[in-house]
Image (cartoon, grey):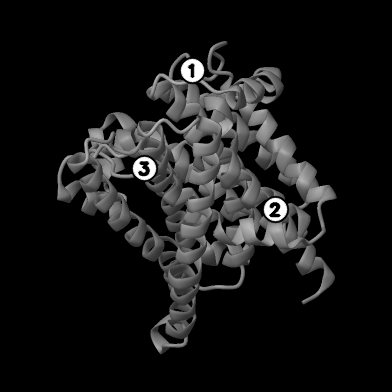
Amino acid sequence: MSKSKDEYFNFVHVLRGLASLIVVWSHLVGWWLPVNQATSNLQGYWENLIVRPFHLYQNGGHLGVLIFFLISGYIVAHVSLKENSSRFLLKRFFRIFPALFIVLIISYIIATFSLRTNLSIPLGNNATELKDYLYSLFLLDYPLGTPSALAVTWTLFVEILFYLLTAIFIKSTKKDPLKATWYFIIAINIIIILSSINPIINRIAHYAVYLFFVLLGRIIYLCEKKYIPLFESIILGIVSLFCYILFYDYLYPNSLFNESSHIIYTIIMAIIVFFIFKIFYNKKYKITTFLGDISYSLYLIHLPVGTLVLNILHKNGIPFKYSFLISCTICFIVSFLIYKFIEKPSQKIAHKLINISIFKNK
């Protein structure tokens, strides 16, 4: 592996790990504490040192999500230049759904156990019957408006929309990346403009608006690798960011510039953090590699497993600082097991399947 490729993967890995940790913190501390009418000095320090000074939305959790979106746009741009549409979608399918399937099974078991033992249902699980888990598995809960079994999967729905557009425009991207990126922008605009036609399109539009932000990652990659000239990249970035802000304010009125939410500050911070790590981080450490590897599984599993552990320990009078440490440790262990025994084998299966003739066709 060349030095440049090493640096590329190091930069991506550390940001993945960082983003997942921010989301875990925001949920297991910033969300769990008020729901359970509890307090902790840990949250106080976090708010005083990080959240308030930088005006972060959702206790910083939204920052982690936006970083994930930038990473996705960056990586998918890299991958799409090497694959045809069928190979691309096959790899993405095996990247997303096997781990999601396992986590939803775990979530169902935990929810059932919690009901039978008088514990609170884990945060982010609003499922009331088995079919809600099936809808959540295929991410149909968002366009259909059914209860979600795993709240964090709304970002996966955004990812799937981006994958579909990438597959549609994959040939155009190889021929003319600049023109293809404009196609992305036009397509997203059309989805949002048509949002008033029916409830399903309206729900899709509420997630499709984030695609403008994902596009920023794509634009950064294509500019860096000189597929698109700098000036055109700047124009694309400005247009994409403008559309994101414009349509976000349209779909979520009075939230973007609201003093109590600070979403606009979080958007700016996500871009700054992305560029800082991209420009200055090129080292490889075992801890960042580990966190990057398990980031997807950790992102999925931390709500059902993490809140179950917190609920049990809280019920037994264990102080939150110890409960949180134990909860995170168990989440890391479970995430590693899912990564090792589900994610990695699934990716190997995908690589074997792409050798089948149907996926080799351009």
Tell me which corner region of the image, top left, top right, bottom left or bottom right, holds residue 313. top left
Q: Earlier in the sequence, mark 3 or mark 1?
A: 1
Q: How far apart are labels 2 and 1 at the CA level?
A: 30 Å
Q: Could you tell me how many numbered marks the image carries? A: 3
Q: Earlier in the sequence, mark 3 or mark 2?
A: 2
The 10 Å Cα crowd at callout 2, few under 14, some 14 to 19, many 20 or more, is many
Quadrant position of the N terminus in the picture: bottom right
> Of residues 319 and 213, which is closer to you in this image?
319
| Residue sitting at x 36%, y 42% | 308
Q: Is residue 33 above or below residue 299?
A: above
> Of residues 21 and 154, which is closer to you in this image?
21
Res 255 label: 1
The 10 Å Cα crowd at callout 3, few under 14, some 14 to 19, many 20 or more, is many
Image-based side of 53 in relation to 244, left or right: right
Task: State the image coordinates of residue 51 (x, y, percent, origin top left).
Answer: 64, 23
The amino acid type of the residue labelled 1 equals Ser
Task: State the image coordinates of residue 341 (x, y, percent, origin top left).
Answer: 45, 72
Q: Is residue 137 above or below residue 325?
A: below
Q: Earlier in the sequence, mark 2 or mark 1?
A: 2
Instruction: Note whether residue 191 is visible.
Output: no
Q: How far apart are labels 3 and 1 at the CA level?
A: 31 Å
Q: Which residue is mark 3?
A: 308
The 10 Å Cα crowd at callout 1, few under 14, some 14 to 19, many 20 or more, is some
Q: Secondary structure at mark 1?
A: loop
> Of residues 4 and 133, which is closer to you in this image?
133
Q: Which residue is mark 2?
A: 14
> Of residues 194 and 20, which is closer to you in this image?
20
| Residue sitting at x 55%, y 42% | 325
Q: Secondary structure at mark 2?
A: helix
Image-based side of 209 in relation to 119, left or right: right
